[in-house]
Amino acid sequence: MAEQKIHVVALGVEAFDRGLEETGTPFVHLDWRPPAGGDTELVETLFRIETRCRDEQGHSLVDAANAEAFRRIKAGQPVLRRVRPAHEVLPGMTRTTIFHAGPPIAWADMCGPMRGAYIGAIKYEGLAATDEEAAALMDSGAITYGPNHHQGCVGPMTGMVSYSMPLLEVENTAFGNKAYSTLNEGIGKVMRFGANGPEVIDRLHWLEKSLAPVLDAALQACGGVNLKNVMAQSLSMGDEMHQRNIAASLNFYKAIAVELTRAAVESGEDAARIVDFMVRKNEQFFLNLAMAACKSVLDAARDIPYSTVITAMSRNGVDFGINVSGLGGEWFTAPCLKPRALYFPGFSEEDANPDMGDSAIVECYGIGGFAMGAAPAVTRFVGGDGLASALRCTRDMGRITVGTNPDLPMPNMDFAGIPSGIDIRKVVATGILPVINTGVAHREPGVGQVGAGIVTPPMDIMVAALRAFERKYC
């Protein structure tokens, strides 16, 4: 009888591989694991959604809805048009209205940095002279507050948006909707990390009265800037637009440099100070632009019946929340996790506040942690084996998304498009959670940033959203 070759496929458990390697047996490793970690109840939920959400021809209504959500995400064209005061663009806003990052939260439940930022925003608006007076206004209910996302806004970390603050206005020209974000404050003691001293307030007033009008005039003069083009160019230069925005900030400045200089000269503002702030002292300037761009794109994919695509991920320093397209504006929340981070000298995990900010909107789009493989300079935050871990991270994100966006290619990954459109079904089925690049705030207000790293949402919110989806559609 002729000798037959053995062909081995090793499923899931890597320990099998070692035995085959030791005996010299050729094999192929298949990274398989039971759906939903073997949780039979969740497997049944996934099965019911798969089998019951179908049209008369037997086609999946969920797949069709997600394809439409992905089409809208891919087609989005975010163009930065203006920089305008919050009260001019947010309906019904008054001087006693202040919005924050993350899902809804009561003043009494806010973390230290968020409380510090509210106190600072109240003083910035001239509603109180001292921290005590500002806190008393919050205690009394005199301040109206709520999530930025409910207003079409996003903001990093604490995410304060108050009456006088200038907002970046981004229009998604493919669908006609707009989204807004504050200007990035730069580094040091800043309100987004809960600081509220005189230097913080002075910088905010400079942003409002000096930088914002000049930047607005420059944008009107050049007809706006397509931020998707800036992001595509910057991906090819090593940015992922969450942790690293060096190239993006420079590319944005290049797009408006002539108009910005002319506007500064005509207004009598200090052009050198404006350029110094935007280019040399603030490598994260583009982050807020990227957030508004991604918000404008994701908002166009909201409220699609049967879609399981995540349209927002956001944190308030206490709770992590998500929105799902087919479930409208309903928040699914669970306690925030602390990031897995590298800490600045003198700080440790004990100093860290749980994660916060609206900036995870960029991961919903497919940049940030999802594009880690395109940004070698941020690989130190993922641990493991450096660049290989970053590439693996991006590939894993491809397993939980609807598709890849060829308009935003990653050179390090053979120019594959960024993975985009997080599908809660795939998250629960694979057990792979979205990876978010993030800064780490000190738990006490005013100390500022103490590190940077990565964080994931709690799996509980994915499961809760999936079950709510089943109740609504099955």
Image (spheres, helix red, strand yellow):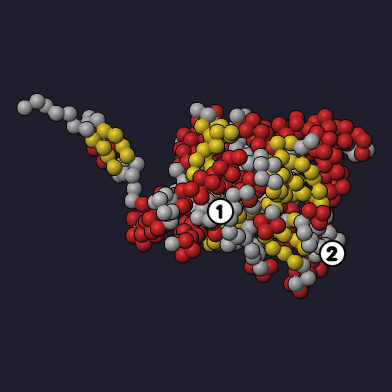
The residue under the point 36% across, 52% down is: 35
Which residue matches tag 2?
A: 127
Name the element at disc 1: loop
Residue 331 position, x and y percent, is: 57, 61
Instruction: Give, as a three-letter code, the residue at label 2.
Output: Leu
Q: Say few, some or many: other residues with alpha carbon within 10 Å of mark 1 (under 14 / 14 to 19 / 20 or more).
A: some
Q: Answer left or right for 14 relative to 346.
A: left
140 vs 129, nearest the viewer: 140
The residue under the point 47% across, 46% down is: 400
In the picture shown, does residue 128 fall above or below 315?
A: below
In the picture shown, does residue 259 fall above or below 197?
A: above
The residue under the point 74% across, 36% down is: 225
The residue under the point 88% across, 36% down is: 264
Figure quadrant of the C terminus: bottom left
111 vs 197, nearest the viewer: 111
Residue 383 position, x and y percent, is: 49, 41
Instruction: Give, as a three-letter code, the residue at label 1.
Output: Ile
| Mark 2 to mark 1 CA distance (whole Å) | 41 Å
Q: Quadrant of residue 196?
A: bottom right
Image disc number at residue 304? 1
Q: Earlier in the sequence, mark 2 or mark 1?
A: 2
Residue 98 position, x and y percent, is: 75, 61
Q: Quadrant of residue 39?
A: bottom left
74 vs 382, nearest the viewer: 74
Figure quadrant of the N terminus: top left
Image disc number at residue 115? none
**Residue 442 visible:** no
Instruction: Farthest residue to the bottom: give it.
Output: 140
Q: Say few, some or many: other residues with alpha carbon within 10 Å of mark 2 (under 14 / 14 to 19 / 20 or more).
A: some
Name the element at disc 2: loop
